[in-house]
Image (spheres, rainbow, N blue to C red):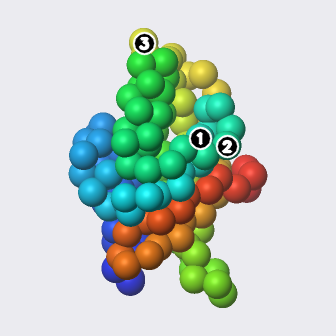
Amino acid sequence: MDDDIKTLQRIYERFNERDIDAVLAALADDVVWANGMDGGHVHGREAVREYWTRQWTMIDPHVEPVDFNRTADGAIIADVRQSVRDLQGQPLQEQKMVGHVFRFRDGKVARFDIRDAI
């Protein structure tokens, strides 16, 4: 398994534990991150922090990677099982599979996009 995939596994673990600082440390300073709640992207580590902090006041998302594949152009697609609960633990959506697309630069995540449900 290559180092980028190991980094992604740690990112998912830390995200699910709400260890935001550990996740942000794996992102490039100028990261471009998909905003799954509102659409578009947020730019930079602090914008990602604000996005997640706001998100976690409304919902309790959990993402579990089940497979990683590197594309011909070097991106990594993580097939993830996503579940979203309200803050009382009640499901807000059926568990579904989603594709997360990561692009790395100098060992850090430079861009994250969400692919249609798979």
Residue at 68% in and 38% down: 39
Q: Amino acid at mark 2?
A: Gly
Q: Measured from the top left, where is residue 6 in percent x and y?
A: 34, 72
Residue 17 vs residue 109: left or right?
Answer: left
Residue 92 vs residue 49: left or right?
Answer: right
Query: Which residue is under mark 3?
Result: 88
Which one is in front in this view, the residue at disc 3 or the one at disc 2?
2
Residue at 35% in and 76% down: 107
Q: Amino acid at mark 1?
A: Asn
State how far apart marks 3 and 2 are (Cα): 28 Å
Which corner quadrant holds the C terminus?
A: bottom right
Labelled disc at residue 35: 1
Q: Amino acid at mark 3?
A: Gln
SS for dot 3? loop
> Which quadrant of the view contains residue 42?
top right
Q: Measured from the top left, where is residue 69 in percent x and y?
A: 57, 76
Answer whether residue 60 is visible to the viewer in this image: no
Mark 2 and 1 residues: CB-CB less than 8 Å, in contact?
yes
State how far apart marks 3 and 1 are (Cα): 23 Å
Q: Is 19 situated above or below 65?
A: above
> Which quadrant of the view contains residue 62?
top left
Residue 70 vs residue 31: left or right?
Answer: right
> Which quadrant of the view contains residue 74?
bottom right
Residue at 48% in and 18% down: 58
Q: Earlier in the sequence, mark 3 or mark 1?
A: 1
SS for dot 1? loop
Query: Which residue is under mark 2?
Result: 40
